[in-house]
Structures are given as C-alpha cells and as structure tokens.
Image (tube, rainbow, N blue to C red):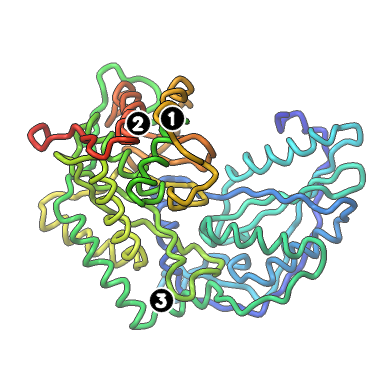
Amino acid sequence: MALSMFERFCHDRVALRFEGAEAGIEPLTWGQKAFLQDMQESGNQFSMGGMLGLPEGGTVEDAVALVSGLIGRHAALRMRLDTDDAGRLCQDVAASGRMDLNIVTIPHDADRSDVERYAADLMTDWPSERFDFHRDWPLRMALVEHRGSCLYLVWVLSHLVADGGAHLLLLDDMLAHRGGAGPTPDARSQILDIARREKTQNVRQVSSRAMRYWESQLKHVPAQTFGEPVRPPDQAGHRYWQVRFGSPAAHLAVLAIGRRTGTDVSRVTLAVVATAIARVIGVNPLTIKVMVNNRFMPGMADVIAPIAQNSVLTIDTADVSIDEVVVRARSAMLSAGMRAYYDPDELREVSARLDAQRGYPATVTCRINDQRVMVMRAESDEAAGEITPQQVRQRLAESSLTWLGPREHMHEQANILIENKSDVLSLHMMWDLWSLTISQVEALMRAVEDVAVEAAFDPAAPTKVSTLNI
C-alpha cells in the first residue's frame, strides 16, 4: 500500500525529554569524518531506516519511555555538529534535550496487514528526508498507532553517528527494553571516548601505519579505475544507471568454491567479481575500495558510533586459476582490513603528495561492498548440505537481470553491492554510463555467474585473463 493512500491518516507529535551521563564537545571521530566526506562527495546522507514491532496493547507513554531511555543511554544519539574556535567541525553531545516523537494513527477500519505495510513503506521512504546536522538530532522516530494500540516504532538513523554494526546494537537495545526497564546498562565506550582516544599518540600511530599501506596501493593506480569518462555521442538523459542481477546457481557455486578452498563466501565472491571485471572490462590488476567494520579493534566491538571505514586493495587475476585468485583475495582482504582505521585528513595529505609525484590526480572509482550480515566459512555452512554439479546446472535457468532505472548522482564509476539475500547471489550495481556501456555491464553481471560456475568443481579452472591482453 503506497504512502500516498494514507494522507487521510492522523499525524501528531508528542515531545519527549531525555538526559544522559555523557556530554561534551570533541573533534569528529575518524569514522565521522569518513562518512561526512562520502556524504559531501556523493550528495547522499546515507541514512538507515528501521522498524520494531511493539508489544500488543502498548501505549504512547510506553513508546516515549523506550525512546527516551535509548537516547539517554547512547551519547551518539544526542550529538549535533558545531564549530570550534578555529572554525573546524566538531561534535557537541548534549546532556539533555527534547525530541518530537511523530505519531501516525491509522484509521480503525484498516486491516492489520495494511498497517504493517505502511510501517514498512515508511521505513523505506523516510530516510530520503535530509538532516540538518547542526540543528537536528541524528535520529527520527515515528509511532504507528491502530485501534488504540501502538504497534510499530519506525526510525531513521544517520550514518554520521552509527554504522551498520551500531544500528544492529541499537536494535538489540530496543528489543531488550521494549517490555520494560531492561538490563542494567554496561560500561561500553561512547562516541566521545572514541574521539578522545583518537587524539592520543598510540592511536595516531595506528593511522600512520595505515597510511604506509595506502601509499603502497595508490602509488601506481590510474587516474580513474575504468579510464577517463567520455560522454557517448548518442547519450541522452540520465548519466548514472543501476541494475540488479540475481543468480541462485552462482550462490551455490560460491559456496562450493569456499568449501574447497577453506575461504568464507565474502572473499570468494570478491575473487569472482574481480575476475569477471578483468575478463569483460579488461582492467587488471584491479584496485578497489571495500568497507571494513573495524569492530575487531580494541574497545570498538559494542560502541555506538560510525566505526566502519573504507579500505583499498589490489587483486591480480592474470594467468592463474580462479582458486589462486581466491587465495589472493583472502590475503588482500586481510591486509586491507588491518589498515582500515585511520584519520581521513591524513589520507588526504598522502593522496595529494602521491598525485604530485605521479604527475596526475588519481582516484579509486570502483567499490565492492558486501552487505551480507553473516559471513561464514563456507565449509561449516551445514544448511547448504552437499552441493553437486547437477544442482548448480539446474538453477542456471533461474538467473535474472533487472534494469532498475537512473540515479541522480554518483561520485564513483561503479559501485557493486552484494546484497543480503539468502539462496541467491544478488548484485546491485550502480554505474556511470560515460565509463561503462549497458552492454558491458550486462556482460559483466553474467560473467560473475560464469566464473563462479566454472570454478565450482574445478580447482584448475583458469581466469581466462592474460597479461598479454591487458
């Protein structure tokens, strides 16, 4: 049911007050700087939507208590941007404040399924509304009410204060407290603790070590990953487009490769996609951006803050087997993961120096982002059972390619999202039509399936990429 069908619904607001123990002004954390830079470059605020079912018979007062407690426990939710005496952006965490809780009352005669569908649509559409980070709190909440009962809590959370890992932690917190007081808060680090820690010499050295790795990766990259964008003579309309490719066969094939090589499905998929790019587009070695959650760092596991940052890696797929590319991808991801916690200001300085040495500015304009929540070692995935060549062949007919329409803006030439879907390898690709043609992108999507299936049961399957052709 479309949101427009609910225009006759009653919209109201109730003010809720909150207070927390942690407050103060500190510099932005490295994760905040990184997300803010991505927001400025892309024009996208990267907000996350969420929805929580509430106990039957819940009241507005119950919801107010739940949200007030949540904001009070987590300093990041009480943060707004400010500027320090030198004019630099900083974060200002309030000790107390007020926020409006939006209340949407669905007409009494609506079906319960329609109410749930409305809440889900709101969760999807609401993140498109932008925040003013100097004025607004980084969290918006709405309560969906029907027949006198508060059924759903829907929210929008800015990436400026939380990454995907923190979002899940906040959901766990709400689940623990939605029926009452919940457990006693633990002594987890807060976003201000992270900002203070990043000013210390020991942690600054972590960033410096990361810069040596980044320099090794960026020293010889081309100006842009897929060459200089050129507008096609017949190009009209939108410059940026998107497609989704789904392959149950590739999903099974990736699991089979992972079991044989002892590698988790994320690294196997990275190797398969890199090989497909080399085959179809002819870019090899391939240097790409990847997102690393950084929550393995000391004190970061349960902090509510944007800890995830970009890292970079390079994979060479020429004249080897696909299994060997899997080994290289595994090693490359390990190195990239260990060097993904850094000060973005320091990276800008390194990049400027390398640009001057090369004689041209260079940017890595290809991103592969694995959004799957669970990354497991494939051989321990008991749910999959035995995978046979016949099973893989039978699923080939189920592959799908769907053109999703235009995008308004991108700051990369290609962004491939590996979506969090079960029983199918689902790729959502957004790209620049001035850099890659529609036929190239379709061939690339289908090549991902080809590469995975070829290597599923053949350890010697070649990449079919030669240095002579690069």
Q: Would you say the residues marked 2 and 1 are in contact, meaning their CB atoms lie under 8 Å apart? A: yes
Q: Residues within 10 Å of mark 2 (few under 14, many from 20)?
A: many
In the picture of the structure, the residue carrying the numbered disc 1 is 249
Q: Nearer the viewer, residue 159 or 112?
A: 112
Q: Nearer the viewer, residue 322 or 29?
A: 322
Residue at screen point 22% across, 42% down: 224
Which kind of residue does numbered mark 2 sit on?
Val
Residue at screen point 52% across, 65% down: 305
Q: Which mark is residue 24?
A: none
Q: Residues within 10 Å of mark 3 (few under 14, many from 20)?
A: many
Mark positioned earlier in the residue sequence (2 or 1): 1
Res 60 quadrant in image: bottom right
Q: CA distance from mark 2 to mark 1?
A: 7 Å
In-image side of 264 versus 66 (left or right): left
In the picture of the structure, the residue carrying the numbered disc 3 is 198
Point out residue 405 in the picture as x, y percentages from the top left corner: 47, 25
Q: CA distance from mark 1 to mark 3?
A: 45 Å
Q: Nearer the viewer, residue 376 or 199?
A: 376
